[in-house]
Image (cartoon, grey):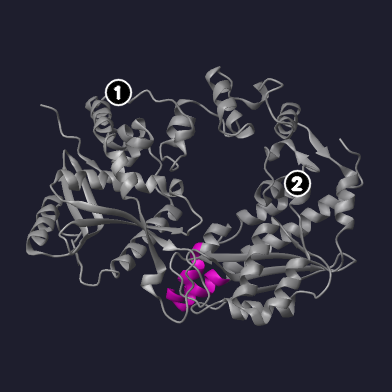
């Protein structure tokens, strides 16, 4: 007699992505990378969005997670179905060794049931079902189990946040969510499920030997795999900078890998694009390319005073400020280093108070602090430009001033993005965290000496939490946020100095 699979919904979808990952999760968990703080925040966000979605069905009952075994959850679900409960949250079922907990199970007037799988991603009419394919597989195994348990499922939907919704005075739950009917797609997947389960059964029947599954694009799609370091680094010894970095993950890089070529310096000529070849050649020869004339033109395009400018933002899946959309980035902080024509700099900064909407005070102070002429220098212009446009849309009274800043923006990343200044150690990248340590290593040391906040991700995470801190802790974190953001614009000042210095050098 075959041993039951003992799979959850998450294990099923893990197996769809990679059977080796499934096996490791079951039998060799110690090699998997534990979820970091950002992953934990994603889980928390999912729980919050799920709880809100349940409010769409106000008479529903939730199967308690804590204090009950899965056997008890299944029994309670069946009891409530027998009692005529029409809306059950976390309804729990088991069939053929597969355990599923349905976010929302709704009984219709005709006695059939509807499945609602809730996700914290956003959706609008411009998106396609391909964009949520990974969620459809989640729903498909739920349908399979519930159908196997004898329920008549008439509709299956993915419940997502409506990206067109904007908050106004109070949260409108009905408008916040949108239901995407995937019934047809789920039905089409049913025929494939028994074969997939048989494959998983065969894979898991051997508890000693992990499956021989090679690395590939599936290691990051549809989800980054927590066995990545184990498979790529520990087992395959793929270097951090490899053919998959220089040529990207695709047909060419996989062909080279299968031929035993993983190091960038071993990539043969003639298979890369011109841009890729420039990066590969620089790596092979450990060279630096400096186009002094083009850099001189870039520097000359800057008008004094130069405002080195950087925003910090946070985002919330559920909006709670007027004009805010789901998952919209909300500006709460900025740093300015204003450089005059003689090179002297003045630093100005803003950090919103904890609690309420940070944007009105930020806008008011920004329009006072930033010069009304000269260049506004940012690193990676799409971010700051997008934030300024959003602020202008949300606060039309300040739109003219905000868009005047927007229209004076020049991107400090451009010389590096266009490889006017390219050091082989940039490995094809041009982010400030890649460029800054090479051009201004003393700034890298300054970041390492920071207390509490060391990067934008930590800043984004901590700001919404300031309101719940005690006064002493809040003071410490506010100081840390200011010091971090100050370094971001100071780094830009120092990088620009290096570019100016490079114009005195000959092209290499």
Write down the region rendered in magenta.
461-478
- Around disc 2, counting alpha carbons within 10 Å, would you say few (fewer than 14), some (14 to 19), or many (20 or more)? many
Cα distance in 3D space between marks 1 and 2: 47 Å
Residue situated in front as seen by the camera: 196 or 190: 190
Q: What percent of the width, then of the height, locates residue 211?
A: 34, 25
Does residue 460 appear left or right of residue 162 in this picture?
A: right
* Image vertical order of residue 94 relative to residue 477, above or below: above
Q: Of tags 1 and 2, which is closer to the observer?
A: 2
Q: Which of marks 2 and 1 precedes in the sequence?
A: 1
Q: Is residue 273 magenta?
A: no
Q: Is residue 473 magenta?
A: yes
- Around disc 1, counting alpha carbons within 10 Å, would you say few (fewer than 14), some (14 to 19), or many (20 or more)? few
**Going 41% across and 40% down the picture, which residue do you hit?**
226
Which quarter of the figure has residue 409?
bottom right
Which quarter of the figure has residue 302?
bottom right
Does residue 80 appear left or right of residue 202 in this picture?
A: left
**Which secondary structure, mark 2?**
helix
Residue situated in front as seen by the camera: 351 or 135: 135
Q: Which mark is residue 416?
A: 2
Q: What percent of the width, then of the height, locates residue 159?
A: 35, 59
Q: What percent of the width, then of the height, locates residue 452?
A: 53, 62
Q: Name the residue carrying label 1.
A: 209
**Going 86% across and 48% down the picture, which residue do you hit?**
295
Quarter of the rendering occupied by the N terminus? top left
Quarter of the rendering occupied by the C terminus? top right
**Going 64% across and 79% down the picture, which residue do you hit?**
396
* Image vertical order of residue 12 relative to residue 442, above or below: above
Q: Which mark is residue 100?
A: none
Which quarter of the figure has residue 177?
bottom left
């Amino acid at each position: 007699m075959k041993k039951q699979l003992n799979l959850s919904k998450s294990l099923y979808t893990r197996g769809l992505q990679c059977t080796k990952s499934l096996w490791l999760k079951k039998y060799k968990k110690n090699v998997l990378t534990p979820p970091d703080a950002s992953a934990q925040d994603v889980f928390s966000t999912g729980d919050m969005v799920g709880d809100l979605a349940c409010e769409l069905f106000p008479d529903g009952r939730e199967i308690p997670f804590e204090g009950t075994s899965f056997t008890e959850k299944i029994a309670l679900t069946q009891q409530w179905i027998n009692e005529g409960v029409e809306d059950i949250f976390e309804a729990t079922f088991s069939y053929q060794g597969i355990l599923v907990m349905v976010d929302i199970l709704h009984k219709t007037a005709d006695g059939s049931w509807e499945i609602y799988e809730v996700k914290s991603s956003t959706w609008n009419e411009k998106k396609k079902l391909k964009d949520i394919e990974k969620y459809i597989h989640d729903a498909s195994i739920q349908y399979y189990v519930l159908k196997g348990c004898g329920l008549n499922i008439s509709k299956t939907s993915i419940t997502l946040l409506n990206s067109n919704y904007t908050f106004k005075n109070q949260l409108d739950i009905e408008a916040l969510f949108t239901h995407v009917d995937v019934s047809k797609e789920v039905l089409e997947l049913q025929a494939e499920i028994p074969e997939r389960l048989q494959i998983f059964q065969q894979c898991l029947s051997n508890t000693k030997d992990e499956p021989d599954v090679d690395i590939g694009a599936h290691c990051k799609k549809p989800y980054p795999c927590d066995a990545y370091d184990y498979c790529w680094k520990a087992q395959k010894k793929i270097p951090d900078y490899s053919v998959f970095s220089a040529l990207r993950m695709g047909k060419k890089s996989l062909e080279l890998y299968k031929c035993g070529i993983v190091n960038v310096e071993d990539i043969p000529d003639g298979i890369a694009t011109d841009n890729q070849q420039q990066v590969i050649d620089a790596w092979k020869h450990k060279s630096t390319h400096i186009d002094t004339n083009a850099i001189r033109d870039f520097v000359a395009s800057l008008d004094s005073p130069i405002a080195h400018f950087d925003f910090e933002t946070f985002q919330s899946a559920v909006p709670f400020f007027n004009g805010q959309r789901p998952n919209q980035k909300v500006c709460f902080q900025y740093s300015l280093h204003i450089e005059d024509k003689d090179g002297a700099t003045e630093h100005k900064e803003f950090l919103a108070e904890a609690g309420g909407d940070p944007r009105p005070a930020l806008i008011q102070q920004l329009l006072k602090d930033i010069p009304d002429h000269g260049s506004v220098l940012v690193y990676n212009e799409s971010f700051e430009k997008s934030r300024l446009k959003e602020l202008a849309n949300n606060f039309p009274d300040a739109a003219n001033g905000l868009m005047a800043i927007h229209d004076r923006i020049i991107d400090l990343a451009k010389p590096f993005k266009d490889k006017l200044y390219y050091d082989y150690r940039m490995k094809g990248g041009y982010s400030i965290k890649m460029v800054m340590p090479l051009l201004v290593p003393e700034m890298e040391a300054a970041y390492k000496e920071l207390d509490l906040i060391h990067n934008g991700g930590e800043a984004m995470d901590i700001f919404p939490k300031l309101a719940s801190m005690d006064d002493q802790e809040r003071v410490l974190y506010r100081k840390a946020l200011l010091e971090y953001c100050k370094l971001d614009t100071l780094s830009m000042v120092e990088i620009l100095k290096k570019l100016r210095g490079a114009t005195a050098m000959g092209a290499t």
